[in-house]
Image: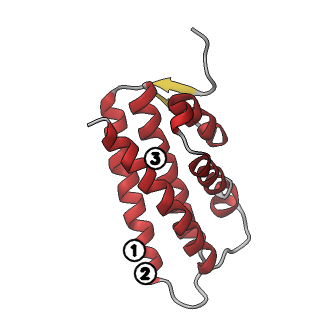
Amino acid sequence: MTRKGRAKSVDAAFGADRLKLARAYLKAARNEVLLVEPGDIGNPVMSQIVTAAIAFTDALTATYAGRANQQDHAAAVKALRDALGNRLPTAQETNLSRILGEKDEVQYGTRPRSTADAQSLLARFEEFASWAEAEMTRLK
């Protein structure tokens, strides 16, 4: 068996637990967007969105392939494609790529992002999260 990037084998419980975390981060991001005030920085909301996207991706790859990506979040999109194949719509692959593309800047960068940026990323993520939830319930 060939190794596929930085991933580890995981069981079904891991996927279920990551799904719970993904939902919690999504809820926190939604709540935070509701509380923003003019002039607030969007980075914290965007950081939660990125974390939620990673957790949803882990839940999907764990459920469909018994594996979870580790450390290299840029490889998460490929891991999801490997796990789902053609069931991963191009639109959702693009959404995930763009969300994860924000990770380093919003979590480690110095450039403040606007609340409009955060709201836009949340809208993109809502599409991804809805699709991911539907994929997770397909197996039940």
User: Residue 109, image x and y in percent?
Assistant: 71, 63
Image quarter (top left, top right, bottom left or bottom right) of the C terminus: top left
Mark 2–mark 3 contact, CB under 8 Å? no
Q: Is residue 63 above or below residue 32?
A: above
Mark 1–mark 3 contact, CB under 8 Å? no
Q: Is residue 3 left or right of residue 112?
A: left
Q: Is residue 115 above or below residue 24?
A: below
Mark 2–mark 1 contact, CB under 8 Å? yes
The residue that appears at 50% across and 25% down in the rendered structure is: 8
User: Residue 128, image x and y in percent?
Assistant: 50, 55
Q: Secondary structure at mark 1?
A: helix
Image quarter (top left, top right, bottom left or bottom right) of the N terminus: top right
Q: Is residue 140 left or right of residue 131?
A: left
> Disc number at residue 31?
1
Q: Secondary structure at mark 3?
A: helix
User: Residue 120, image x and y in percent?
Assistant: 59, 72
Question: What kind of residue is marked 3?
Answer: Ala
Residue matched to label 2: 34
Q: Is residue 68 above or below residue 9?
A: below
> Disc number at residue 55?
3
For the residues labelled 2 and 1, the Cα–Cα distance comes to 5 Å
User: Residue 19, image x and y in percent?
Assistant: 36, 46
